[in-house]
Amino acid sequence: MPQIPALLAAAGLSFLMSVSAQAGPRLDHIMQNHVLRVGTPGDYQPFAIRTADGQYKGHDIDVIEAMAKELGAKVEYVQTSWPNLMKDLQADKFDVAVGGITRTAARIGQIAMLPGYAPFGKVALVRKEDQSKFKTLADLNKSSVRVIKNPGGTNEAFVLANLKQATVSTHDKNAEIPALIADGKGDVMITETYEALHYAKDNPKLAAIFIDHPLTPTNYLGFMLPVDDADYLRVMQFDWDLLDKRGVLGAAKDRWLK
């Protein structure tokens, strides 16, 4: 049994050496320059958040850093936004996008995504004193309810489709919305299981509701990849699987998603 990690490492090195001689253009560029460009909005706890000093931390950051290490590359972070996420990836501004990105048919119809992780549903973040007011989706969908949304993602899509009677406003910085709710400048933030739990734990004024019975069926998050290089996709899939078997993905889950 102690030989298994060494065998996995040897298999990974052998695989990467074998593909380097026949890599496609994107993989070839990464292997030659030893740089993996990672795009992220950096505003979604606990998956990827940009700190005050310009660094990044979170579940997805731990995982992509480990993946880059397997490639013999360092990570170069590229700031993007939810409205621009897809077009920035397709415009070759980065090689992979991370940060709590929902796997959807619409996205996978245009790009590739690595295997799903972190099962979740749409839930709501509200002030703790107000949580008894909101028992159903209909309770949220009233003109007296002020909903604050972030533009460009699936949370916005849910709000626009399901809360048409609510008073909806938009705030560009997703990470600032929980504080706005806590301060009474809005009543509801539609988000996903892990983000809601994170902010409710971090701020005693907030409560995460619909956790046990989410407003949507279970879905999964995933890393987004361009589809211009089949060799690159194959190596990234191998990288993900290797880290999964080594327990790296499990360690990231235990650190950030418990």
Image (cartoon, rainbow, N blue to C red):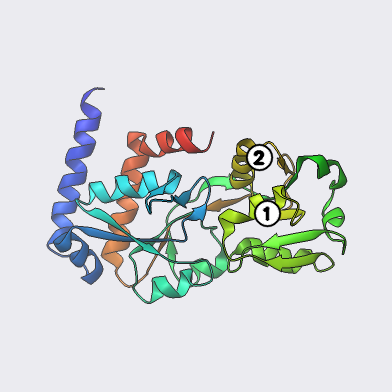
Residue shown at the point (12%, 62%) measured from the top left = 21
Q: Amino acid at mark 2?
A: Ala
- Tell me which numbered mark, 1 or 2, is placed earlier along the sequence: 1
User: In which quarter of the view is residue 211 placed?
Assistant: top right
Judge left or right: residue 20 versus residue 44: left
Direction top: furthest residue:
1
* Quadrant, the N terminus: top left
Who is closer to the viewer here, 195 or 31?
Answer: 195
> Mark 2 Cα within 10 Å, few/some/many (few <14, many 20+)?
many
The label nearer to you, 1 versus 2, is 1
> Quick check: 189 left or right of 143?
left
Q: Position of residue 197 (x, y in %)?
A: 63, 40
Question: Which residue corresponds to the image point at 71% horizontal and 40% vertical from the top-left?
Answer: 205
| Residue 66 placement (x, y as % from top left) | 30, 44
Q: Are marks 1 and 2 in contact (CB under 8 Å)?
A: no
Report how many numbered discs are placed on residues in the image: 2
For the C terminus, the quadrant is top right
- Picture layout, residue 207 above or below residue 140: above
Which residue was labeled with disc 2? 200
Q: Taking 201 as reference, is 101 left or right?
A: left
Give whichever of 235, 255 is nearer the camera. Answer: 255
User: Mark 1 sits on what residue?
Assistant: 180
* Residue 63 picture location, percent across and down: 37, 45
Query: Crowdedness of circle 1 by 10 Å Cα count: few (<14), some, many (20+)?
Result: some
SS class of the residue under badge 1? helix
The amino acid marked with disc number 1 is: Leu
Q: Residue at x 20, y 42 (%)?
A: 11
Q: Secondary structure at mark 2?
A: helix
Residue 247 point in image, percent of width and height: 37, 34
Identity of the residue drawn at 34% across and 67% down:
94
